[in-house]
Image: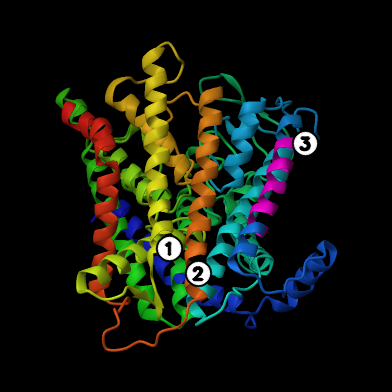
Amino acid sequence: MNSEIFGVIFMFMATVVLAIPFGKYIAKVYAGDKTILDPVFNPIEKFFFRVSGINGTKEMNWKQSMVALLTINLVWFLLAMLILLNQGWLPLNPDHNPSQTPDLAFNTAVSFLVNCNLQDYSGETGATYFSQLFCFMFLHFVSAATGMAAAAILFNAMRERTTDQLGNFYNYFIKSLTRILLPLSVVVAIIFMLNGMPMTFEGKDTIQTMQGDTVQVSRGPVAAMIPIKHLGTNGGGWFGANSAHPFENPNYLTNMVEMIAQFLIPLAMVFALGFYLKRKKLAWMIFGVMTTGFLCLVIPNMIMEQHGNPEIARMGIDMGSGAMEGKEIRFGTPASAYWSILTTVISTGSVNSMHDSFMPLSGMNQLLAMMVNAFYGGCGVGILNFYIFIIIAVFISGLMVGRTPEFLGKKIEAREMKIAVMVTLLSALLIKGGTALACYLFHRDPSLPWLNNTGFHGFTEMLYQFTSCNANNGSGFEGLGDNTPFWNISTAFVLILGRYLPIIGPIAIAGILANKKYIPESAGTLKTDTLTFGIMIFAVIIILTALSYFPALALGPIAEYFSM
């Protein structure tokens, strides 16, 4: 085993070791138990509630929680649009970057609002310091906290026997910010600054290269934004090259910290569920299914990228280092391949290499990670997405054994299944419908400045864009010229639907079930914390994903692979 692969294994194991106690801490935060940070943040939280006039102790049902979520998100969207359309004359613009166009501002505001951070602009030239800090970094925090607060409501619904009171959305939202995201971001920011990440409000610097050329190098308060970029599974970076830029990812230690940071909270939320419900076996079952899916994607990617491109090998070029085109040569091919799947399974979307340069089947695995969107997932929403698969698996299992489907003492009936199926089918509709429309328009007018690659790879670029938007991921195949009115507007609507309906759907199901009569477990109750049920969920995920997306994948990455 070489050192590069050992580094990947160490990063994964370190994240799991950190996630278990951190999950216990998250469970205590949402349960209202005492924590070490209470003396610091209790007065701050009380101040927020007093100034806003919001009663953070008032119980809400699931409908009230969703209204609160959507209302506050609308306010943030309007604020983001105002900033982006006027950033050119606002302060903190030492490089004199212009304001964004209306279609680009619309896409950018929606994208950061929904935790996707699809960047149709180039980071350091398309945004100002003011926009990066007061729009993007602000939305990094609140979008992540929104997903985590929604997960906390789900936790309550799963724990209570019969109730329609599921806690207070605003309370969970504030606690997610003050007790979880902010303290972690401070710690990670200190690590980044100590390792040379820029933290300055000065404009571009002039340097002379070893060739004697004079170039302008962008900088800024980068270290303030990058921690929450990853901890909040946001992915929107300061620079256009994202974490492939040496200022955004200076060395191997920062590369390791960034990978652990983006993985930590989604994984910890799984264990938090077990501690919150006092059902640790259920959490370990969920962790096992998610990890199995993750490994089925990441191991082949690491192998394929290490073997390299056979077309280049046929030319007699040494491929000893693997497929290095578009890779981060400082950290090696395995680390880039590991990041590519990690960032797509947890909807971060950050990159330390260019996904467009990966082998065809590696690109397929990145697509599958986003199409499933439930192997860990983003902050909070990963649990919500997985919950849909649990409901479907319980229903199918009940039909197979001839019993009324039950989950945690609640009967699953037609109403809940209709919502689960609608949420599942929505993703396929948005992804394949958007791709079909883009293909149709490009076929009518091939002169459109969209694709640097035609054929199978060009189709994959368009498929990847809509898949990334639906999964609120934000990564892309950068051969696609996406800063056009069509892509900015069409993907923005996919972003909105792909964010809010998969949050509202699971919360609606959980709220409906919570209000039903509790049925005590008996000898005939389906055990949902066993290996057998874990295999059932995994099979449901594989079958539904294959039925929904195999034809599209066959036209893109699979066809490209067989054409090589």
Q: Residues within 10 Å of mark 3 (few under 14, many from 20)?
A: some
Q: Amino acid at mark 2?
A: Ile
The first of marks 1 and 3 along the sequence is 3
Looking at the image, do the residues carrying marks 1 and 3 touch, with CB atoms under 8 Å apart? Answer: no
Residue 415: mark:
1
Label 2: few (<14), some or many (≥20) within 10 Å?
Answer: many
Q: Is residue 457 visible?
A: yes
Residue at 52% in and 49% down: 499
Total numbered circles: 3
State the residue in front, 192 or 548: 548
Q: Say if 422 sits above or below 187 in the image.
A: above
Residue 37 pos. (x, y %): 68, 75
- Residue span colored magenta: 68-82
Residue situated furthest right in the rendering: 51
Residue 189 is a magenta residue: no
Residue 265, x across and y down, in percent: 50, 63
Which quadrant, please, contains the C terminus?
top left
Dividing the image into 4 quarters, which one contains the N terminus? Answer: bottom left
Can you identify the residue that label 3 sits on?
A: 92
Quarter of the image for residue 526 reads: bottom left
Q: Image check: 274 left or right of 141? A: left
Is 420 drawn above or below residue 498 in the view shown?
below
Taking depth in this image into account, of 181 and 508 the one nearest to the observer is: 508
- Residue type at numbered disc 1: Arg
74 drawn magenta:
yes
Mark linked to residue 512: 2
Mark 1 is surrounded, within 10 Å at the Cα level, by few (under 14), some (14 to 19) or many (20 or more) other residues, namely few
Q: Tell whether label 2 touches label 1 (CB within 8 Å).
A: yes
Which kind of residue does numbered mark 3 sit on? Answer: Leu
Q: Residue at left 72%, top 75%?
A: 57
How far is mark 3 from mark 2, CA to CA? Answer: 48 Å
Secondary structure under the numbered disc 2 in the rendered image: helix
